[in-house]
Amino acid sequence: MRNNIIVNLFIGITAATSTVASTTNERTLDNGLKVIVREDHRAPVVTSQIWYRIGASYEPEGLTGISHALEHMMFKGTEKYGSGKFSEIISANGGDDNAFTGRDYTAYFQNLASDRLAIAFELEADRMRNLVLPAAEFAKEIEVIKEERRLRTDDNPNNFVTEQFYANAYLLSPYRHPIIGWMNDLEFMTIDHVRAWYRQWYVPNNATLVVVGDVDSTQVFALAHRYFGTLKSEAITKQRLPQEPSQMGMKRIKVQIPAQEPYLIMGYKTHAMNSSVIEWEPYALEMLASILSNGASSRFNRELVRGNEIAAAADADYSIFTRVPDAFTLDGTPAKGHTIEELEQSLRQQIEQIKTEFVSEAELNRVRNMVVASKIFEQDSLFYQAMQIGLLETLGLGWQLADQYVDKLSAVTAEQVQMVARKYLVDTALTVTILDPQP
Amino acid sequence: MLFNKSLFFISAALFSWLFVIKGAIAIPKIESWHTDSGAYALFVPAPELPILDVQITFNAGSAREMRPGIANLTNSLLTQGAGEWNADQLAERLENIGARLSVGSLRDMAWVTLRTLTTEPAKNVAVQTLTAIVGQPKFTIPDLERLRKNTLVSINQDEQNPGTVGNKAIFRAIYENHPYANDPSGTKESVATISQTDVVEHYRRYYVAKNAVIAMVGAIDAKQAKQIAEQITKYLMPGELVSALPKVMDLDKKYVELIKFPATQSHVFVGQIGITRTDVDYFPLYVGNHILGGNGLVSILSNEIREQRGLSYNVSSSFSPMQERGPFIMGLQTKHNQVKQALEVLMQTFRQFLQNGPSEEELKNAKQNITGGFPLRISTNAKTLEYLASIGFYRLPLDYLDTYCAKVDAVTINQIRETFQRRIIPEHFATVIVGTGSN
């Protein structure tokens, strides 16, 4: 009970603290580009990110990996700035830049001293519509991407198994495809495919520009208007999203590849924030994942890694902010002297326990306090704040949700945790994938 | 998500505490002192956010251990029981207040890092818990056995990753009989036999106040910083600052090692002895390497290997300055039948750089990147803590940041050429190739 008192005091104090922090302003240009600016004047630096509403989950059969391939090609030059110039110019201005592709987005960023923001805008606006996409550059870059796939997936046993898990769990959902794409699709892809993908999706009305740092919102809007304002909006055809049919029984896959240690990933199909009719459910699943494996005092660490010492490591994962329903996954490696079957059994016992006994108020409070603190900690990173804004906007959920997240998660009750466990974490929606190490 | 340009090699992490000064930015004023028991403390106030970051670093890495793996196990065991609390209770105490605590251990250093809110009771509970973890660890046999088993699993997992296999091999090749030859995680043979006495002895000898550096950044004043430094060292024996490590011998001949590995790609490492953290040639070599292969895609190696030829996703070169001379390593990964070509281009590019040095423009752009990027490097409390810990551990002068820009700007092409030629002898490179396939 002493813990509870600490907890409550703590939330009271930090909630007050976190409201002073920042101002966020948004504006939409005539061409549909949404611009969001968060002022943070702690240091004379800025992060500028542009998020496109396109990613692996939009890709057609046979062209998996094309969003990521285009992301690589975005560094290969425009009519005005040749191949590689983008990063060279940012670098010579004291900045760093990079890009990342997800299932639901493709994003590009520059971190700079705040007086250099205009340079990033000019370059980013230029490559939104004026990429050259030379065939010769693509011929080399697709080989780089294949090497990336070998590095990250083909030669990494646990990642390879995770890819197999998603491919086997889903029949139609686009989440069954890897972001980097299947090797065979990379072999098949041509520069013409990439050009078409670029023209179709890289338009101002399919993007969000996020700026966080030591800037003045009004000036940033003016700059955005100056550099991006001339770009024309284009009609975007909404794609039909294939609906995953209901799974009617447990699936079990064994992957036999060279490895030293076994690995298990199992997942239950759930609803996404967008598709869920019941608003609190995703938060209850998020709370559940945290109770199971967020932190050294979480259940998996306390009971499976320490406790009965069956797991060398065990995790529960749930992505609350996704475009398409995702899986609630459990993964881990058995401890020495224990089998993968014992690990699976223990993980499933943990789920059964959630269904039959309420989680404790102390556990709920621990997670609440961790997210309250995280919310303060993340203000130390401009980049992280911009990421959150970009992701939520790209999913159409609105950046304000980042600020409501703590309250919504904190409101989850023990009953709700049990309800989502009973509803979603059922064997008929389960896929189990096991790495069976081969010499 | 997939990062296009993320660096796989150690360069990014190890150089993250290098900075350059720019006129406009306020360089944090470092306050430093010794605690009553002799620990070296450094503090920078950061009043904007209600956060406190603390890192206590001991000169107690694997270079100090009697047998491979002792330093790592000792460090990992700190959080498994301390003072009146077992691992569960320590975790709960910290996570109930939303604090984050992590431990880590490499060749030179072993550390504990804490991030907490400065609100009460959070700060007091966090500091009190840190005090026990650092000064009153229990090192019980059941905890040791559990971590031993899990370390063995983790070493096995290293063996299924060709990059990790190669990294361990290149250190062995470069360092031969020097303590730096051993990987901090230890070997299976050695970890299997580490006793409680080994751990306790390592702790008693090296986790002492005079061998500790405390770095603090956050919303506290100097008086509070002094109290906290006193508190977290109060259970430490004063002890002695460790003596210097053995000197590292230069390689005097070529060495090539091929390691067969079941993978689709080969990993190539080329390296030799580099520099210490306080080396007289530090600046010309750092700036030179930034141009050669230390600055992501904007580097000569990346241009030749990735941009021009599409041979590898990651290619980089890095100096890892340490107490004694750390390594200089170049690395890439490519499919098996391109290894010969990639290695030839790598070596040819390096020799050309050695002979000619960088161009005027390359040097100018690199300086602008390093000095212009200075505000970014100290823009968060987390980053400031990192360099503070490094300045403390390597006993760099407190005006290190104030003089850094001038030192970078003073570097000339001739200096880069001369120091590289004097320090790196291509005929004495050690080369490790993992995953040679059938040829």
Image (spheres, helix red, strand yellow):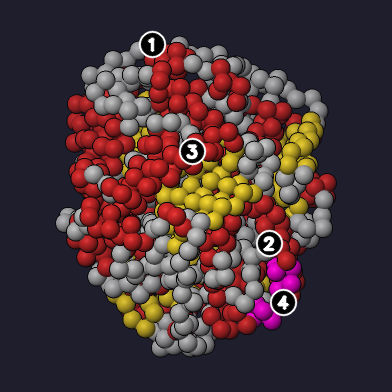
The residue at 49%/77% (across/down) is B246
* Tag in front: 1 or 2: 2
- The answer to whether residue B198 is magenta is yes
Q: CA distance from mark 2 to mark 4?
A: 14 Å
Label drawn at residue B306: none
Q: Which residues are magenta?
A: B190-200
Give SS at disc 1: loop
The chain ID associated with circle 3 is: B
The chain ID associated with circle 2 is: B
The residue carrying mark 4 is B195
User: In the image, what residue type sits under mark 4?
Assistant: Ser
In the visual, does B369 lie left or right of A240?
left
Give SS at disc 3: helix
Give SS at disc 2: helix
Residue A315 seen in the figure: no
* Tag in front: 1 or 4: 4
The residue carrying mark 3 is B342
* Tag in front: 3 or 1: 3
The residue carrying mark 2 is B151
Name the foreground residue: A276 vs B175.
B175
The first of marks 2 and 4 along the sequence is: 2
Q: CA distance from mark 4 to mark 3?
A: 45 Å
Q: CA distance from mark 1 to mark 2?
A: 55 Å
- Tags 2 and 3 touching, CB below 8 Å: no
User: In the image, what residue type sits under mark 2?
Assistant: Thr
* Residue B426, position as x, y percentages in the image: 42, 54
**Do marks 4 and 3 share a chain?**
yes
Q: CA distance from mark 1 to mark 4?
A: 69 Å
